Image: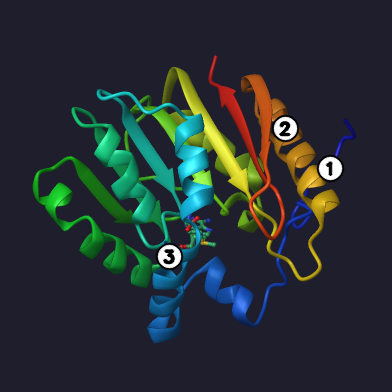
Amino acid sequence: MSQIPIAPGSCPATCPPSGIFQQFRQPTGWMGWGIGQLMALKNRSRSEWVIDLIQVQPEDRILEVGFGSGADIRRASALATHGFVAGIDHSAVMVQQARNRNAKAIQAQRVDLQCAAADAIPYADANFDKIFAINVAHFWTQPLEVLAELRRVLKPGGLIALAIQPRTPNATEETSQQTGEFLVNLLNTADFEQVRLHTQFIPPVSVVCVLGIKN
Ligand SMILES: C[S@@+](CC[C@H](N)C(=O)[O-])C[C@H]1O[C@@H](n2cnc3c(N)ncnc32)[C@H](O)[C@@H]1O
């Protein structure tokens, strides 16, 4: 496996920092709201595959980073029936949409959603059994700083899962493969253990998901 360098913009799935891609990076306004609804519809198979990989247990305390529409918060909380699911997203529009989608669970205090950035997570140390982020890590300009923050809120022995399906123009299977290598290098460099890569073909190109354990 080759070593893809960890530097701002070096993730092979990095999107251009303008146009419609900006709306996926941080949805705003009515267009951002619409993109959230579209993601809830279109990303289902990808999300179900990733959530299967993290094997949610009834008592799990889970954090999703960059929850977008909140559809995966709902999926995870349906499985963590006696646990707790938290989420952060830096888009105020997505926080509102995800709160609407999870209103009952929020009311029951089984879900908590906050507007926050991935490098400043508003939860205490060693709080979660599992953390996942789907199509978010390629937006991080300082990924090692974010990983240090995710380690802080993860319990010792806790699981992290970073999944990406490259959506850049002209993305190919090679882009997915290189993105997987980048994520493996990222988790190893951030001192996670038992780092492993899973790949699943879901059109238009394969999704990669890298899992690691906090020692
Ligand atoms: C492409 S969307 C993916 C949404 C969802 N995970 C999915 O797969 O449908 C990326 C989401 O991550 C959020 N996001 C991107 N970078 C972030 C950061 N540094 N901190 C918090 N949220 C971030 C965006 O606001 C957006 O809602």
Q: Residue at x 73, y 66 (%)?
A: 168
Q: Amino acid at mark 2?
A: Val
Q: Residue at x 25, y 61 (%)?
A: 101
Q: Residue at x 34, y 57 (%)?
A: 70
Disc 3 target residue: 41
Q: Residue at x 67, y 25 (%)?
A: 196
Where residue 172 appears, x then y in whole percent?
A: 81, 57
Q: Amino acid at mark 1?
A: Pro
Where residue 67 appears, x then y in whole percent?
A: 41, 54
Q: Earlier in the sequence, mark 3 or mark 2?
A: 3
Quadrant occupied by the C terminus: top right
Left or right: 192 with respect to 128? right
Distance in Å between CA atoms under marks 1 and 2: 11 Å
**Given this view, does label 3 or label 2 mark the residue nearer the observer?**
3
Where residue 87 appears, x then y in whole percent?
A: 35, 48
Where residue 105 appears, x then y in whole percent?
A: 16, 47
Disc 2 target residue: 184
Disc 1 target residue: 5
Q: Earlier in the sequence, mark 1 or mark 2?
A: 1
Q: State the image quarter where residue 178 is shown.
A: top right
